[in-house]
Image: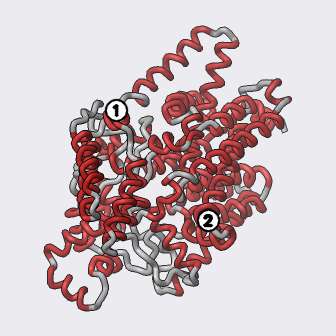
Amino acid sequence: MRRQTRRAKRSAPVRDAWVVRRRRFILAALLLAALSSRVVAFLQVRSTPLVQMDRWRQTDMNYYVEWARRIEAGDWRSASLPLPMHRWHHDVAARYWAGHPDEKASFAQTGRDPDEALWARWMRVPRFYQDPLYAYLIAAADRAGGDAIDAMLTVQLAAGILTIFLIWSLTRAFFGDAVAAVAGAVAVLSAPLLFYELLVLRDPLIAGAGVLILWLFEQARRRGSGWSALLGVAIGAACVLKSTFILLGVALGGWMVYRALHGRDRAMALRAAGCLAGCALAIAPVMARNVAVHVPALSLASSGPLTFVSANARGATPDVGFGIDAQSLAAFLGSTDGGWGAALQAALAARGPLDYLALVWRKWDRAWHWFEIPNNENFYYARQHVPMLAVLPVTFAIVGPLAAIGLVLALRRRREVWPLFVLVAVTLTPLLVFYVLGRFRVAFMAALIPFAAYAAVAIGQAARARNHATLAGLVAAVAVVALWIDRPLARDQVLIRTSDWILPWSVEYEGRVYGALDEKDPRRAADAYLEFFRHQPTDAQITASGDPHLPAELADMHAECAQILKAAGRAREAEEQLVAARRLLALTVTR
């Protein structure tokens, strides 16, 4: 009993009677603020192109939604599993066909698209290309809610509120009420956490799954085997959502097994068994499906090895996130079995140890930089269209410096707060093994928030106690780390890319324009083009964009519109578009 009392005192070094007395009020206020911001953001985003990104075939959103529609149409086993065929997939196939023209001809004779058939062979269809749970969630949400996008966003926003509660609860368990209140406020005010909940992408659910597993782990080791079974179910389901969760499952399950064996703890052995049983129960449907379609029972995402090769090849550029060397990837897929063994050999053989460490350092550097590296989406473009995102002040630029110092401060209490350290390590590892994107980093950010709050409260305590030496040291440490994390963008980076500025074109107007042209209706195509130009950035935004390609791209679009207008017999409007094109080319972009 004394041992437990001493531990309780150590686990709550930050005590604030005022916060403790108002715990329920603070929690209610946090959850109400989280709900309000999400309702407002949902209403705002519905009038933007962001909710139509599943129409753009080059996005992951499109792949997940199309897969979900096949599931809902009756293919619940995903036996006719689709593959995404983005531009880079075709580029890789083209590099392969250049050396295998006879093979391409034989594929063409079957009546199938040769590129799709080639990728189906490489990915061993019907093995899953991506981990499957998210597509099934979209299908279930569509079936329940009537509209896949609105229903899935509602699920994700609700999960975001739950994530905030779990961050508050975990922080309170490890650091006390005062730190929990700050952590909850940071999470509520975090614009990136909310932004990724507004997209049909699995990343916010991944962030929530991490803190949920850790919360269930705390319940399991304190309360009993019933919670352990729930923990196992959560770990198994999380692995089906994102297979990298196996790292967290091994870490937490390994601790339970170690305690059971090392301490001869029968109760802990039962909890470990319950966790394993729950995990098996969660992944049993996937195993049954895999056996039914004749693929290995435990196989999940087949795209992992090729992603690893691309992220660690000699020409990999962590600054830009996802990138493909089509030639090297075609050689890898065409000359190996595409498995993990071949991927490790292909990626690491091209680099010496020091070269690989340098690459990992660059990924580490990107993982901590303030910039939300875009992929299908762009946080900074979205802030211009969803006012709630612009209002919320917290980004990684704030969380990162505080969390870095909080991690150092918490080292002295590592024996009590080690599960939080494990969550940080597990969410950081995929970024270092693969590549860094803003949406991939959201789980890492959620794991860092308790440490950021811990540092913030430590600074506040030092100020309140007038401990000037400690206060100056903490503030100086945060400032030094902020100089690293919050430094300007590299010269080859821009806040908003050309592809982001013309997002309305990609998700809606491109199809309308070229569809009308295919139907020999230039007037309707011209009207759609002119409607798109109402969404293009202003001259001031173009000159401040830092992207020298943006004016030329827009000028080319105006020139194309002029040609369509001429075909429609609208010469005066065509001349106006040519004038607009010349004006755009005359703009000077500043960095």
Q: Residue at x 30, y 54 (%)?
A: 323
C-beta proximity under 8 Å, tags 2 and 1: no
Q: Nearer the viewer, residue 275 or 51?
A: 51
Give above or below for 539 relative to 153: above
Please state if 224 lies on the left or on the right of 142 as rendered. Answer: right
How many residues crowd mark 2 within 10 Å: few (<14), some (14–19), many (20+)? many
x then y, percent, for residue 117: 31, 81
- Please identify the quarter of the rendering in which residue 181 is found: top right
Label number found at residue 544? 1
Residue 203: percent from the left, percent from the top? 53, 54
Q: Nearer the viewer, residue 264 or 440?
A: 440
Secondary structure of the residue carrying tag 1 is helix
* Residue lying at 14% horizontally and 73% vertically, measured from the top left: 98
- Foreground: disc 2 or disc 1: 1
Depth order, front residue of 185/141:
141
Label count reads: 2
User: Disc 2 on helix, strand or loop?
Assistant: helix
- Decide which of tag 2 and tag 1 comes sooner along the chain: 2
The residue under label 2 is 237
